[in-house]
């Protein structure tokens, strides 16, 4: 009975719940609205509290940690401005299906609805950004609602849960039994659905499998790859999910990201069966909702997803299977493989097209800094367990197209397209796996949004390596600008600091690379330094994508306009 339990403050009960649910690391920017939680963490040394420099960076760290480990990333921020800054990471976790727990300090209960200092109604603010939002007004309910938060964040389609904590509630004394750990609940595929899926696959001429979404474990990745190889099915991945299937396997045929290979797009359109496993088939992956008909896909679609509401949301599947990824992947490995599949040539051709795409595009004027050669060198240099993080921007086409991802290595990038993700994600990844090489890819625009989190890396004594693509512009927007308004440049040019000097001021390693031959020595020196590193890549601004130049885009736009 609760009456036999010792009295604890609300803050102590919150930390007790974190302990019970196995939290090992949390990310924070301190605030007076949750001092009781911070004080209770003083007595919980097994929880590594990472002190960050801005709530947006902290939120990206928590999201990256959740994406990397499969365990909820935990974030602690203060009310009002802190919560608003953190919202970008919450939105990213929602779109990326990443488990996350966000603890937000709140004004005292007797001040609510008075527009008190920094007051925000978090249920309204976070409603479209989070999987669930709650506020704990009674201290003795902390174990109950924290348990519910972890269950919701990890079950079905994973996502972020926001928990508001009124500051006076955290001071209240209560006797309550802390419970945990959480047990994620996921659906399993039914035998009849699996049999129908196999029947449809056996009848296909040109099948292709699309993998993506969240909730993948290393074992699930191995199982789905084994299923693809056993049945000789070509596999592509959704936007920024290239680490699900080993890119070196003969079944892997590319990714449907922002710079998808035209040959792969044509393959999807020509396929007579698409087996989509985990992917929502969202805007980027569907190439602007053009790959399949709406709502009738125009071909056989087997769609597997953890959330029932995603099945049939845009594209009506022939067979809809609600299942967790580990559960589905384990089940299909037990199916008898299709004997002598008629699509072997189809798969081999798709693989050959992918491998051809690994060869860098030859531009009329070879750039002094050849990013294709640099990516090719990195592809051979990075070990199997390397973690690659990516910010949002056109520069990301280089690692997306030319690197090859596999487990236990990982690719962490925001499918939400949030700029500022790359540096904090790299810091979080290096904290989670200090023994691995972590390389973060950033543009100059995104770096300046959250680059201060390298101070967090210095404080933690870890050394992520940031490759900073400097073309002195918001490249993605400039690309679209040239396509729609050729030659009319406004709002996209940037004046940048000396990035190498900036990281040295933080206490890290800095280098500037302007020629191809300078990259390898700079990278090895960064690895050897053991410190946070920034290698600034002085790009030719003309190299706007891996396949074309700004001038070519401008000429095409001008020709189209007559």
Image (cartoon, rainbow, N blue to C red):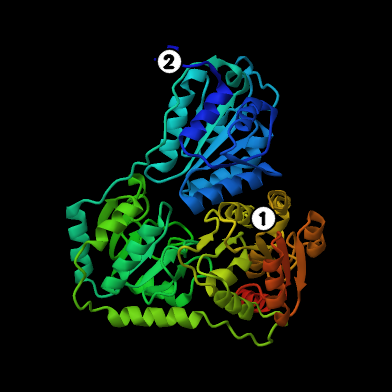
Mark number displayed over residue 401: none
| Label 2 – label 1 distance at C-alpha | 43 Å
Mark 2 lies on a secondary structure that is helix
Q: Residues within 10 Å of mark 1 (few under 14, many from 20)?
A: many
Q: Quadrant of the C terminus?
A: bottom right
The front one of 230 and 302 is 230
In the rendered image of this protein, does residue 216 appear above or below residue 144?
below
The vertical placement of 52 against 201, above or below, is above
- First of labels 2, 1 by sequence position: 2
Residue 105 drawn at (x, y percent): 62, 29
Tell me which corner region of the image, top left, top right, bottom left or bottom right, holds residue 468.
bottom right
Residue at the (33%, 70%) spot, across then down: 208
- Residue 410 lies left or right of residue 352; in this view the side is right
Among the 4 quarters of the image, the one containing residue 52:
top right
Name the residue: 79% across, 64% down.
500
x, y (%) of residue 338? 20, 71
Q: According to the image, label 1 marks what residue?
A: 462
Vertical placement of residue 441 versus 321, above or below: below
Residue 2: mark: 2
Judged left or right of residue 471, residue 3 is: left
* Image quarter (top left, top right, bottom left or bottom right) of the N terminus: top left
């Amino acid at each position: 009975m609760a009456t036999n339990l010792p009295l604890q403050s609300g803050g102590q009960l919150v930390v007790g719940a974190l302990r019970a649910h196995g939290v090992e690391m949390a990310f924070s920017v301190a605030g007076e609205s949750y001092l009781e939680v911070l004080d209770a963490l003083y007595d919980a040394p097994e929880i590594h509290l990472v002190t960050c420099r801005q709530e947006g960076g902290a939120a990206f760290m928590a999201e990256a940690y959740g994406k990397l480990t499969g365990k909820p990333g935990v974030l602690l921020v203060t009310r009002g401005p802190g919560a608003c800054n953190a919202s970008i990471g919450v939105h990213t976790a929602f779109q990326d299906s990443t488990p996350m727990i966000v603890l937000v300090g709140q004004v005292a209960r007797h001040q609510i609805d008075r527009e008190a200092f920094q007051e925000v109604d978090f249920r309204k603010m976070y409603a479209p950004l989070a999987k669930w939002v709650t506020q704990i007004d009674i201290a003795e309910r902390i174990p109950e609602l924290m348990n519910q938060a972890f269950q919701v964040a990890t079950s079905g389609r994973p996502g972020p849960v926001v928990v508001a904590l009124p500051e006076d509630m955290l001071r209240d004394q209560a006797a309550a039994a802390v419970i945990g750990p959480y047990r994620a609940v996921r659906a399993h595929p039914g035998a009849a659905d699996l049999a129908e899926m196999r029947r449809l696959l056996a009848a296909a001429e040109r099948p292709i499998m699309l993998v993506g979404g969240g909730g993948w474990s290393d074992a699930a990745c191995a199982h789905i790859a084994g299923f693809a190889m056993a049945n000789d099915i070509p596999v592509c991945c959704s936007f920024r999910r290239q680490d699900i299937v080993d890119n070196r396997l003969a079944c892997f045929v590319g990714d449907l990201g922002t710079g998808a290979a035209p040959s792969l797009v044509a393959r999807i359109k020509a396929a007579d069966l698409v087996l989509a496993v985990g992917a929502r088939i969202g805007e980027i992956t569907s190439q602007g909702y053009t790959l399949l008909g709406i709502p009738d896909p125009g071909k056989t679609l087997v769609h597997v997803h953890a959330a029932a509401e995603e099945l049939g949301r845009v594209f009506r599947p022939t067979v809809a299977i609600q299942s967790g990824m580990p559960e589905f992947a384990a089940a299909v490995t037990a199916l008898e493989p299709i004997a002598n599949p008629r699509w072997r040539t189809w798969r081999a051709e798709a693989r050959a097209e992918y491998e051809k795409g690994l060869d860098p595009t030859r531009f009329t004027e070879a750039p002094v800094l050849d990013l294709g050669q640099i990516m090719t060198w990195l592809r051979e240099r990075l070990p199997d367990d390397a973690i690659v993080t990516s910010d949002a921007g056109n520069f990301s086409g280089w690692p997306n197209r030319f690197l090859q991802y596999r487990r236990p290595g990982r690719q962490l990038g925001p499918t939400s397209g949030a700029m500022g993700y790359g540096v904090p994600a790299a810091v979080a990844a290096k904290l989670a796996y200090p023994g691995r090489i972590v390389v973060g890819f950033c543009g100059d625009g995104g770096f300046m949004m959250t680059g201060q989190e390298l101070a967090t890396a210095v404080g933690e004594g870890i050394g992520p390596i940031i490759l900073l693509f400097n073309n002195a512009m918001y490249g993605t927007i400039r690309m679209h600008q040239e396509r729609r308004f050729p030659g009319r440049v406004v709002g996209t040019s940037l004046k940048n600091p000396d990035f190498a000097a900036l990281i040295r001021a933080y206490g890290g390693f800095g280098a500037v690379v302007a020629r191809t031959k300078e990259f390898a020595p700079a990278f090895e020196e960064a690895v050897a330094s053991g410190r946070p590193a920034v290698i600034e890549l002085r790009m030719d601004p003309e190299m706007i994508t891996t396949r074309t130049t700004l001038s070519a885009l401008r000429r095409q736009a001008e020709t189209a306009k007559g």
